[in-house]
Image (spheres, grey):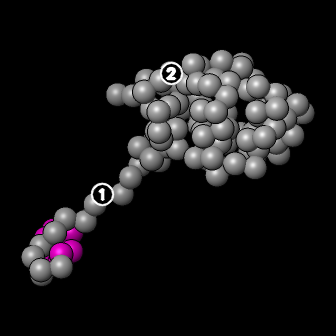
């Protein structure tokens, strides 16, 4: 048994994967968005971002208003609530993860 106390299928010691940190598992690391700067995301990439956050129900609102990465980078929490209809918690989640995606990876 390894230091982490896990056996693989053959009974040999195996390492248990380390738990992912919230930053390492951020939803914005998915698909082609990973290679592009968030402010350059297309409307469809913003929709994928919403899906990754578990907020796919808002995709149509964002698409109807043509929200791309550049526009999203300039929206406030109040804009998301009053103009796109998000509830306060969803608005906070969108902005939190979008701002996190704007930060360069180390």
Residue 40: x %, y % from top left: 57, 19
Q: Is 69 within the magenta?
A: no
Residue 4 within the segment the image draws in magenta: yes
The magenta span reads 1-8
Q: Residue at x 50, y 31 (%)?
A: 33
- Image: 91 above or below 36: below
- Specify whether 32 is left or right of 96: left
Residue in view at x 47 percent, y 41 percent: 30
Task: Please provide percent x and percent y for residue 22.
Answer: 47, 47
Whole-percent x, y for residue 13 in the image: 12, 73
Q: Which residue is mark 1?
A: 18
Task: Give the residue at x 59% y 28%.
Answer: 99
Number of residues whose C-alpha sits closer than 10 Å to that of mark 2, classed few (under 14), some (14–19) or many (20 or more): some
Q: Which tag, 1 or 2, sits closer to the chain's start?
A: 1
Is residue 45 at all visible to an observer of this figure? yes
Q: Quadrant of the N terminus?
A: bottom left
Quadrant of res 77: top right
Residue 45 left/right relative to 87:
left
In the image, 86 versus 32, the foreground residue is 32
**Is the residue 25 above or below the residue 84 in the image?**
below
Can you tell which quarter of the image residue 80 is in? top right
Q: Say which quarter of the image contains residue 18.
A: bottom left
Q: Observer-nearest residue: 64 or 6?
A: 64
Horizontal side, residue 19 vs residue 102: left or right: left
- Image location of residue 16, percent across then percent down: 25, 65
Residue appearing at x 12%, y 80% in the figure? 10
The kind of secondary structure element at disc 1 is: loop
Q: In the image, is residue 89 above or below residue 73?
A: below
- Residue 48 lies, with reference to residue 72, above or below; the image says below
Note whether residue 72 is visible. Answer: no
Q: Which residue is mark 2?
A: 37
């Amino acid at each position: 048994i390894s230091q982490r106390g896990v056996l693989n299928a053959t009974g040999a010691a195996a390492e248990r994967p380390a738990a992912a940190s919230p930053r390492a598992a951020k939803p914005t690391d998915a698909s082609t968005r990973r290679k592009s700067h968030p402010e350059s995301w297309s409307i469809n990439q913003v929709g994928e971002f919403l899906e990754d956050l578990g907020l796919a129900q808002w995709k149509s609102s964002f698409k109807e208003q043509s929200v791309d990465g550049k526009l999203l980078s300039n929206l406030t929490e109040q804009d998301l609530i009053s103009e796109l209809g998000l509830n306060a918690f969803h608005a906070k989640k969108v902005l939190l993860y979008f701002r996190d995606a704007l930060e360069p990876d180390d």
